[in-house]
Amino acid sequence: MLSPEDLMAELKNKQLPTFGTNQERRDRLRKFHGIDPLPRDQSYDLGYGQDNQMFNGKQPLQQQQQFPNIQPVQQQKAQEYQSEKQNNVGQPPIQRKLSVLENIQKMQQQREDRRVKIEEQRANKKQRELQNEAAGIKVDADFDLMIEKSRLSQKDANPHTSTVNMKISVCVRKRPIFAKESQSGEIDAVSAANPLIRVHEPKFRVDGITKFVENHNFTFDNTFSDLESNDQLYRAAIQPTIHFPFNRGIVTCFAYGQTGSGKTFTMKGSNEAAIRDIYALAKTQYADKQPKFYISFFEIYGGKLFDLLNGRAKLAVLEDKNQKIQIQGLEEKLVDSETDMISMIEFAHSERTTHATASNDTSSRSHAICQIQVKEGNGKLMGKLFLVDLAGSERAADCQSNNRQRRLEGAEINKSLLALKECIRSLDMRKHNQDVHIPFRASKLTMVLRDSFMMNAEKTRIIMIACISPGSSSADHTINTLRYASRLKENPGQGGLELAHNPLQQNHQQHVPQPISQPPAPIRYQPPPQQQQQQQQQINQRPQSSIIHQDKPDSQIGGLRARGIGGGGGLANVGRMIMESGSKQNLTSVEEQKQPPIRKQWGDPQSQQQQQQQRRPPIPVPQSNSNIRQQLPHNIGQNNNKYRNEVDAIENAKLDNIKVREHDELDDDSDGSEIGGDREDEDDKLKAQQRLKSKAQQDWNYLKQTLGGNKNNGGWKNQQLPTQEELEDGMNNEDILDLHEKVDNILEKEEELISQHMHLIKENAQLLTKEGELISYVQENDEYEVEEYVEKMSMIVERKLDIYKLLNNKLQEFKKYLREEEEVHNMTVNKGGFAQKR
Ligand SMILES: Nc1ncnc2c1ncn2[C@@H]1O[C@H](COP(=O)(O)OP(=O)(O)OP(=O)(O)O)[C@@H](O)[C@H]1O
Ligand SMILES: [Mg+2]
């Protein structure tokens, strides 16, 4: 290390200038020797002598003491410098100077390029903003441009694959973005090019400023862009299977997706096209069998079934001894023309439980199931077509709502969509292992679609249409929808042939066929004027609950009533029961007030009076006699036997109403039992209900185990192992499953409570009649026996007290269930459960 004096001497010796600080002098000397000057901080740390072999290479003691803690850094940097210097040895200084210049020029060029690029981006952004402004679109131009760059091109789209050979086909349809969405800042964040679909999710980096777009890619059997019409979708996805219902097959088509994503739009369009085709086929290819079409249309709302072609009459689901699921009371209407069929479907849609949401004025809150049965002229069943418009998938997330009504609704939807996914998945797994259990009894939805899952594989087709909204703010819902759809079968998107042999293959080309029927001009059924008047009258008279179930605050039982749980029957049934059982004389005024409203029915050409006569009796929820007996208090003495008898009589009358309809059968894969159409006796019917209840519980447990369990406790038995995503998925959250159970319990107990209440009202009416007779007798006979009067009256009062006590017990019990559900809900929310992923 040179001392300052030595440094000065050295500089003079080399005839170099001596001005400046010691550091500058050292740098000058280094430069002279062809060594780059050290950066200021390094030179300060390292000193001159250390990094130059010319000098003594020792660090001054003074500096070592001054900066003991930076010793290792000094050494490391010194070594780096040393090796750099060695690399430069031998290069003439002029050459090094050139490379420095080149580097500077390169950096300048890069800076210039960057500047031009930023300018370009700004200009593009400005231009886009002006364009958008002119079009009334108020979107973030940065995201808009970024998304545009990563969009899938329609040019790359493949032709659609026919679904004829896919037992399960999964397709996705993107609806167009609406002007009002763009005006409110929504960017079209989805692009589709069959069979791909890409969600462009706009995001911010952690700094909260830098924007970027995350692209999520999915492949399905078919994807449909917003430019493709209902007809194009129908021709690719549904039409190839339209022969199945004429050949002892079942086709089930589902529309799944969040609210406002186009499920109803898609299903209505597909329904019309399918109906045109089946009527065309009936007149041509299958004319020799003289096919006839029977339609039923019902909705599942809050775990209950309502007939949409019969004034929302409440329906019950039973399982017969041959393990076939029967929908007791469901109307099946023979429809002669496609025009009538289409207008009936319109009508049924208008009967659905709807609710206005931000994205859809008539958002459906239920699963709507349209069943078209094809029967030969001789009545033999040829096959079925199910068109299912599912409730909005995001409703499932409502089970975290603070409003109990929404919670019950959401939990029910969640449960059924979960069961549906597992049933379809299990069906898909059957191609590897025939023994895979299909838990179709785990929800009402899958229960009523049992045949779609259990039929002979060669003859059923399941088509899932996942509908998605393009808006950027829906990107997470869209991704969840696509995830749900992608889990329904192994390798969706690999399309092609899934069945070794297809009996109907000869009927089809492998590519999307041409329309069977030419779409006629749009047809709308217009009932005759008289009929329209009747319908309007019926609508006006319909109880509020069956028109639109409005959003009400959390009012527990009131809330349940508001949304129609408890049935379209509800008070109307109570009124009718009073009328049927009570004395006419005493109930005249009640009858006037509680005349059951006439149910709106699809335009029957009969008079209103005829319609009333034809109206089906209310469908009671059957309960076993023993149950009712158990509910009678034990302290009712012998004199009260007549009340027991009356209870039995009521129950028997209820049973008389249960007409399990004869069942037309198709080939069946399930349980090996012979499918019978015999009428079952009453006991069998009660047993059927019990059987179904316990089996439903078993299937639910199976589902719970499958989803919530792990390999050690039997979870994932016979199933694909869950992906990491699924394990983190809220659908598998045990708390949610627990909540479902509580909700189920509430729905079931609510039914019991209402049935008990109706029973009480009826009995009360009978007691009132007796009271009236007694008081008339006392008033009309001066010589009445006061003991007899007191005895009779106390019997009536006792009985009244008993039945009210009974109802009160039920009410207290019900409140307990509500509290329990509330607790589980709060616990889950506090734990941060309810992931909304599906
Ligand atoms: N492919 C499409 N082309 C044009 N308009 C569409 C399309 N899909 C949906 N729409 C329109 O979007 C709106 C919402 O659609 P739709 O009622 O079918 O949604 P949804 O999925 O049934 O919603 P919800 O679950 O709330 O019932 C409707 O006005 C419908 O006409
Ligand atoms: Mg809808």
Image (tube, helix red, strand yellow):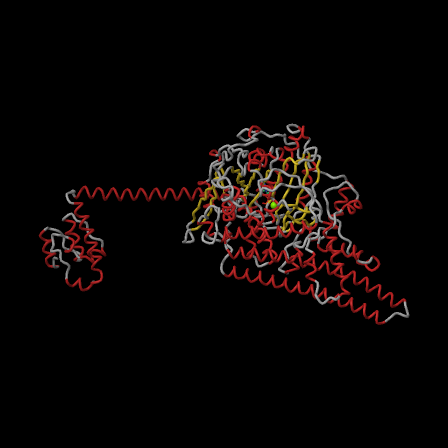
Q: How many marks?
A: 0
The x, y position of residue 343, in whole percent, is 69, 39
Q: Quadrant of residue 811?
A: bottom right
**Side of 417 where 339 appears, left or right:** right
Query: Is residue 471 or residue 103 the one in the foreground?
Result: 471
**Placement of 643 over or under 670, stated as above or below:** below
The percent coordinates of residue 596 (x first, y second) are 76, 53
How far across and down, in percent of the image, does residue 541 sit? 75, 50
Residue 142, percent from left and from top: 45, 46
Q: Quadrant of ligand 2?
A: top right
Q: Looking at the rendering, in which quadrant would you find the N terminus?
A: bottom left
Question: In the rendered image, is residue 433 in sight?
Answer: yes
Tell me: residue 617, above or below residue 790: above
Q: Is residue 414 visible?
A: no
Find residue 806 and report its image quarter: bottom right
Picture layout, residue 806 above or below residue 215? below
Give 238 or 262, whichever is nearer the viewer.
Answer: 238
Left or right position of 597 against 406: right
